[in-house]
């Protein structure tokens, strides 16, 4: 069993991929009552941004003014629930021949589907084009299906997407929307020896592609600051007996992703013992999904509504090569019980365009997106939600999550 300490600046540091569940363990430790050595009111958080010099840096450092988060249950617009398609061995990326069709599987990306999409698409496209076919069917119109379809088009193929649902109805639309390339991507004890390097290749390809969307109209991909707030820093608790050893590969990307740092008390307004700050990529899923759909159609793609009950239904498509991007749907379609549901729920609050930072505190993550404030209770370990396929919203979970963050802004003052 692992027992590790938080290493500032490393990918084991919660702030490195601040809203990635695996990186957030430290914040759940020793959740002491709010250490209110400083003020915590919303009204004081924004205006207290007096210029300061960051200790030890020698540089003039102006603490950025932080617009307060309006964590009011009355501002909640809706709750969404989604299932992460987790596979212990990692995503299924392989070829199978069924009924005379060459089937390329590209499903099972856990909590990393948006992050890894382009890299996974590149691998699947290579397999699909290997025998020279240039008329390809893609089943699925979520993050994986769309990026796979576009990648195939750009390699010269004619592509038709077949899917029961398309964005924004697919599960991909219900994702948090943060760069989280190794979030519940695999069980470290069940992957092949080649998987870590394969993951790294996917992540690097994806990262580069996602960066090319930054600054486009509608900000489909952008960067935001993330604060990880800890009541106390301590050793990582041991993994409970029987818990999955979720793979952690973030350190492989240390040379390309922004790194986190601990903030001095003067550099943040939050009433906590420890705060870390990083800058992370975020996916504004509504805009990104629309952009990918438009790109695919503009480049000559076609989307057909079609549901496949079993592999026998693959005979209904004319193409000889099919890429299967059905996500959690693959469990039923392929009778693949290696696809394990990991439930996740998001409470959506009305957008706050003035907020440009995300936050993690006491197992709750916040991400400001143009389409809403994402409020998510992520549990005290990555086992939270594992094996649960119930997509019924639990309002009380969302209310508790909102109240947890509201306390940061409205708690008692001692300063
Ligand atoms: C709460 C939550 C938060 C998340 N946050 C993030 C995040 O911040 N960053 C990140 O990278 N990832 C995140 N993820 C993971 C990410 O959402 C998934 O990995 C990703 O959506 C998987 O995409 P997909 O295209 O494979 O599946 P889906 O979006 O489920 O798409 C599957 C497609 O296949 C179609 N389909 C399925 N079965 C059939 C069938 N039998 N016949 C016809 N069509 C079919 C569907 O209609 C759909 O079009 C999160 C997941 C959850 C649950």
Image (cartoon, rainbow, N blue to C red):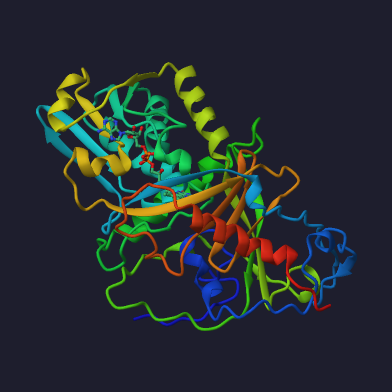
> Which image quarter is the C terminus in?
bottom right
Q: Residue at x 33, y 60 (%)?
A: 386
Q: Residue at x 23, y 44 (%)?
A: 331
Q: In this picture, is 309 found above or below 299?
A: below
User: Is 17 situated above or below 149?
Assistant: below
Q: Position of residue 80 (x, y in %)?
A: 47, 44
Viewer-side residue, 379 vs 227: 379
What residue is drawn where x is 73% and y is 63%?
409
**Furthest residue to the left?**
99
Q: Could you tell me residue 310's position as x and y percent?
A: 16, 33
Query: Is 294 positioned to the left or the right of 110 in the image?
Result: right
- Image quadrant of residue 135? top left
Residue 136 lies left or right of residue 265; in this view the side is left
Residue 39 sits above or below residue 166 on the image: below
**Which quadrant of the rendered structure holds the N terminus?**
bottom left
x, y percent for residue 183: 43, 58
């Amino acid at each position: 069993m692992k027992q590790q300490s938080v290493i500032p600046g490393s990918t084991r540091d919660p702030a490195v991929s601040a809203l990635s569940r695996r990186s957030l363990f430290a914040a759940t430790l020793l959740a002491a009552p709010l250490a209110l050595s400083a003020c915590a009111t919303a009204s004081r958080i924004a205006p207290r941004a007096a210029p300061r010099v960051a200790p030890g840096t020698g540089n003039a450092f102006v603490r950025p003014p932080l617009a307060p988060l309006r964590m009011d249950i009355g501002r909640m617009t809706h709750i969404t629930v989604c299932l992460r398609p987790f596979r212990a061995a990692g995503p299924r990326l392989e070829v199978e021949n069924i009924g005379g069709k060459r089937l390329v599987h590209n499903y099972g990306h856990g909590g990393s589907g948006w992050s890894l999409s382009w890299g996974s698409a590149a691998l699947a496209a290579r397999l699909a084009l290997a025998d020279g076919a240039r008329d390809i069917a893609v089943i699925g119109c979520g993050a994986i299906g769309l990026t796979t379809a576009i990648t195939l088009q750009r390699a010269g193929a004619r592509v038709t997407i077949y899917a029961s649902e398309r964005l924004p109805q697919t599960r991909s639309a219900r994702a948090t929307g943060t760069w989280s390339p190794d979030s519940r991507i695999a069980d470290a004890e069940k992957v092949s020896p080649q998987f870590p390097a394969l993951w790294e290749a996917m992540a690097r390809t994806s990262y580069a592609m996602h960066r090319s969307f930054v600054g486009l109209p509608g900000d489909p991909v952008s960067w935001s600051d993330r604060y990880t707030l800890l009541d106390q820093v301590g050793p990582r608790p041991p993994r409970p007996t029987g818990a999955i050893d979720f793979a952690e590969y973030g350190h492989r990307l240390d040379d390309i992703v922004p790194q986190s740092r601990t903030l001095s008390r003067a550099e943040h307004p939050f009433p906590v013992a420890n705060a870390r700050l990083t800058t992370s990529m975020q996916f504004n899923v509504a805009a990104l999904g629309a952009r990918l759909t438009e790109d695919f159609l503009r480049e000559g793609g076609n989307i057909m509504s079609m549901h496949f009950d079993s592999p026998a239904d693959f005979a209904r498509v004319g193409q000889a090569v099919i890429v299967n991007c059905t996500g959690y749907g693959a469990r039923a379609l392929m009778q693949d019980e290696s696809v394990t549901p990991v439930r996740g729920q998001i409470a959506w609050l009305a957008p706050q365009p003035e907020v440009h930072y995300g936050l993690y505190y006491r197992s709750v993550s916040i991400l400001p997106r143009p389409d809403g404030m994402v409020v998510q209770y992520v549990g005290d370990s990555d086992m939270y939600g594992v094996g649960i396929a119930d997509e019924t919203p639990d309002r009380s979970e969302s209310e508790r999550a909102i109240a947890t963050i509201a306390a940061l802004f409205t708690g008692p003052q001692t300063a």
